[in-house]
Amino acid sequence: MRILTKPTSLRSITPLRLSLRRQSTSVNTLNKNELPFTHTSTGPKEVKYTADHEWISLHPDGTAFLGITKYASDALGDATYIELPEVDREIDANESIGSVESVKSASEVYMPLKSTVTGINEELENTPQLINTDPQGKGWMVKFQVEESENNGKIMNELYTLEQYENFLKTAEE
Amino acid sequence: MFNVLRRAEVFNPKKGFLRNRHRFFTSISLKLDNKNEHSDYTELNTMYTDMFDSDKFKKEPGLNDKSELEILNEETEELLTVKHSSLNSTELENCVRNDGTFVIRSSSNNPYYNLALEDYIFKHTPLKATRPNNRLLFYINDKCAVIGKNQNIWQELYVSEAERKGFEILRRFSGGGTVIHDLGNVNYSFITSREKFSRSFFNECIVKWLLESNQDLSISLNSRSDIYFDGKKCSGSAFKIAKGKAYHHGTMLINSKLDSFNGILRPKNEKDIIWETNSVDSMRAEITNLPLETPERFIDICTNGFQKSFSDNEMNCLPLYYCSEDVTINEEIQKTMHTLKSDRFKYLHGPKFKLKLPLTGDEFSVENGVIVNASSPEYKNMPFQNFVKCSNLMQPVYNGKF
């Protein structure tokens, strides 16, 4: 069984990326040189992953960033449009905050935490390709403030660590 | 012609899935012989009879020189006239939320209902660890133009012209470009797991099933996995991925009034109307009908193909359910219909854009459907939707262009 199998049409286009992914467990690691990491000088206090292939970087001041994983963006193919939420919008846990459109597919992106949108990556408007080239860095989608609550803490605990996410991908592929 | 073809198929022993069908009919027909009231059998036979269209096969009984085959065919046709019943809301919820692979047909032609029903089935199909819960939905919409989730309604369509011609305008939840529907077009929607999803898979199935039904049909897939007949596009596809699941839905033109589609889709690169936007493009293509007798014929072919290909057991025929707007409805579907009808989703959703009208010198920037900047400041903060309605009066040079 495989999670997020590449469509056959895309398989032939991205063999290089596929083989890279198999050799390394780090393709889904956050890019340490871009805002989702560098928002605070010491880096985020936590980076977590969802089963829907989103990543979250949470900083000590409660600011967080969300995007999709390299694994997901490889599987989707070339992004043509990124739908993002309005700034100041309050989001319920597990609500859709936008979508990545690629090759006639709208792929929904979800926010696992109850939060408020404080910024969006405007670069994606003119350069949706950042979702493919650097989804865990320049291709971040949403900046948000996480509401401090028991429930959010619980959700954060339940989300995958990088290692758990990689294992999730591995077991899903078997 | 239609009936002749159907019969030939039912009794063609070379085609495996049709053998199945033969078997079912034989056994059910024998039982029917014992009683006269078809209604008594409605429930019993739903599973099998629902595979077929019930309206198309009415025939006068009574010639004396009937062959065995003809008698059997008559029984089959009698069987086919058994009225199918639609799922009620509880039955819908049960069959959607529980594991299972099935075909489901909407008998409604209301595009809002059909898109909302599709969304409901997609959202509530359970994820399964092993074989995915594959579902195939069919619906036929009344006249409408349907744009992709991330498109600009005015850039895709001559909105006033579409409305004048009686075409409803909708934004859908999936990606891709703009398509036009009418009663001669079938919409199919194949729901599967994200892990099994591939953009080309289901159209490959359709082409295979169509060729099995008629090997001379000149159909093929292009590089974008669109189905072409005689070198022209007869089907368009779009996809949606969410929560571990995906659907591929598409249109199939069978006997659409293609002439009536003229003048609704805005061509690219009009010289007097200039758009600057990152919205998703529609691929313009010459279209044609696929020459099948009726839309129902297409549904039958795909239903049979699906039941044959997706059943894990040759004897176990996958169920076919019917939905109708009056009984197969629930709060969630109504809520989604409301969303689809709302100005917020139709007009205030979608990518930002700039519009330049060189003939009048006007320029606009529009975000979330509202004019945020305009060369004439009085238009600022006006929903673009309102602007175009009055602009047709104010600027005769662009009359009918929006």
Image (cartoon, helix red, strand yellow):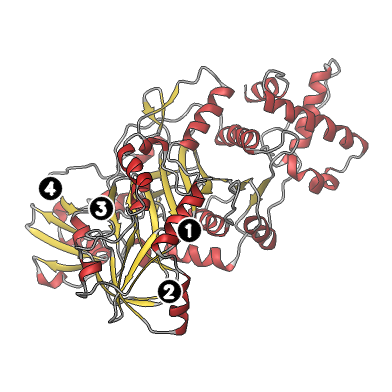
Q: Work out whether B26 lies above or below B104.
A: above
Mark 4 or 1, nearer chain start = 1
Provide the chain ID for the residue under circle 2.
Answer: A
> Callout 3: helix, strand or loop?
loop
Gap in angstroms between the C-alphas marked 2 and 4 = 53 Å
Distance from disc 4 to disc 1, alpha carbons, whole Å, reads 43 Å
Which residue position holds label 3? B279
* B9 left or right of B184 in image: right
Image coordinates of residue B327 in percent, x first then y, are 65, 60
Amino acid at pointer 1: Lys
Mark 4, residue position: B272
Are labels 2 and 3 on one chain? Answer: no
Q: In the rendering, at what x and y percent does residue B233 appear?
A: 38, 31
Q: The residue under label 4 is which amino acid type?
A: Asp
Name the side, left or right, on which B113 lies relative to A112: right
Helix, strand or loop status at disc 4: loop
Identify the residue at image location x=16%, y=55%: B396
* Separation of marks 4 and 3 at Cα, in angstroms: 19 Å
Give a yes or no on whether discs 4 and 1 share a subunit.
yes
- Residues packed near mark 4 inside 10 Å, few (<14), some (14 to 19) or many (20 plus): some
Viewer-side label of 2, 4: 2
**Disc 1 and disc 3: Cα gap in Å?**
24 Å
Q: Which residue is mark 2?
A: A156
Q: Earlier in the sequence, mark 1 or mark 3?
A: 1
* Image depth: mark 1 or mark 3 in front: 1
Q: Tell me: A118 left or right of B357.
A: right
- Front residue (pair B160, B185): B185
